[in-house]
Image (cartoon, rainbow, N blue to C red):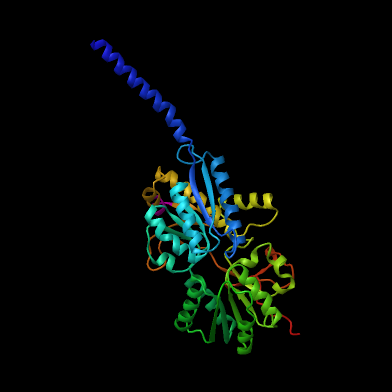
Amino acid sequence: MRRHRWLASAVAVLTAIAGVGLVAPALAQNPVKIGVLTPLSPPGDAAAGQFIVRGAKMAADDVNARGGVLGGRKIELVVEDDSGTPEKGVAGFRKLASQDRAVAVIGQFHSSVMGAVQDLAEQFKIPVFSTQASAKGITERHLAYTFRTHVIDPDRVTIWNRWIKQQGFKRVAVLAENTDYGVGVVEDTKKLFKTMDVAAELKTVMFDRAVVDLTPQLLEIKSWKPDLLINVGVGTPVYLILKQASDVALFPATPMLVSYDLPARPEFWKNLGEKGTYVTFITYYHPTMKLTPRGEAFRTKYREQFKEDPVYGALNGYAQITLLADALNAARSEAGESLVKALLASKFEGWNGTISFTRGEGPYWQQWTPPMLFMQYTRPEQVFTEAKIIFPPELKTGDLLMAPKK
């Protein structure tokens, strides 16, 4: 009887061991899912989202070709369109967290959407990354699961205030959309005009992002006679401001600064034709930049695959996926708490330098900031690689050129 029980127990143990041997490899092959929640349709900046997805997919392919993460598991991207609206962003994040079981989410472009999904990231304990959302409130909240590898708006305003002072502009108009980004930029501009002693008059005009005609606002600005107009639209409104400012003869007679890198995209000239000539814009990447080995490898592959230079959104999407892969391996876990600890404890190879996250004061919380450059197109159809860097002084390759008077 005892011998029979012993045999039965031995068989049970051997069966359990065999079961583990069969199941463990299967578990090891389950993909690690990372969400890409980004605008892929209007009213969001759909082109921006497409570039972010492009970079993220290239990163996942590279990581998987090198053996994946956590002992051989592949990274699987789950892409969701937030359309640049908080409502769709929240719905997309819930799906990624509860249905897809994503371990992290990147791709956030619009500050209003990023602000809406942050609390969900805390609730689900899933790190969420701002890829191009720049409102200072995003990181000022000091939330454990919020990270950013992009500029902060007060820094954006600081650099254009330095440029305004250098150029000696006397009357500066800001035309901004009524989103978290636009409202925040206007508030920061008003505040920093005073603290930086900018010797210029300031006029700010807000507009609804859904508007299809900005002629009244542009005529109001034209009658004020500014010597600089700052275009704080995002996506379609950027083009609308440029086209209609040209139609009312405000631009290019008055210099215009676009507040982010939309003009660096290949579709810029297709949308504007000659009306884009003499525009100045902020960007975070230039093709002449020396990149890290990881960044150089990405740039080479991107050029081969797409026959054009990468734009910043693709570079940043790529960097966020690769640093998450490194963090997963450092954490040896996909658990949110472990992943946050690894993100804070490690240094990562980015596209143009080392990325690390610290819990600094104010908006400098779990934040890494890329460089900012001012560039200008001076002829129709000018390619991005030939545009001159006009600011900051230590990086400039040319001076601001004014349009010839008609």
Q: Does residue 4 appear to the left or right of 282 in the view shown?
A: left
Please say whether residue 161 is one of the residues in the magenta stretch.
no
Question: Which quadrant is the N terminus positioned in?
Answer: top left
Q: Nearest the camera: 304 or 334? A: 334
Q: What's the residue at 67%, 79% (across, down)?
A: 245
Q: Is residue 305 above or below residue 175?
A: above
Occupied quadrant, residue 279: bottom right
Q: Is residue 366 visible?
A: no
Q: Position of residue 276 (x, y in %)?
A: 70, 72
Q: Position of residue 74 (x, y in %)?
A: 51, 40
Q: What's the residue at 63%, 82% (across, down)?
A: 218
Q: Does residue 118 appear to the left or right of 297 in the view shown?
A: left
Q: Which residues are magenta?
A: 342-346
The kind of secondary structure the magenta stretch mainly shows is helix
Q: Which residue is most to the left? A: 2
Q: Nearest the camera: 76 or 212? A: 212
Q: Is residue 65 above or below residue 149?
A: above
Q: Is residue 212 visible?
A: yes
Q: What's the residue at 57%, 83% (across, down)?
A: 172
Q: Position of residue 161 (x, y in %)?
A: 53, 78
Question: Which quadrant is the C terminus positioned in?
Answer: bottom right
Q: Position of residue 256 (x, y in %)?
A: 63, 77
Q: Nearest the camera: 246 or 230? A: 246
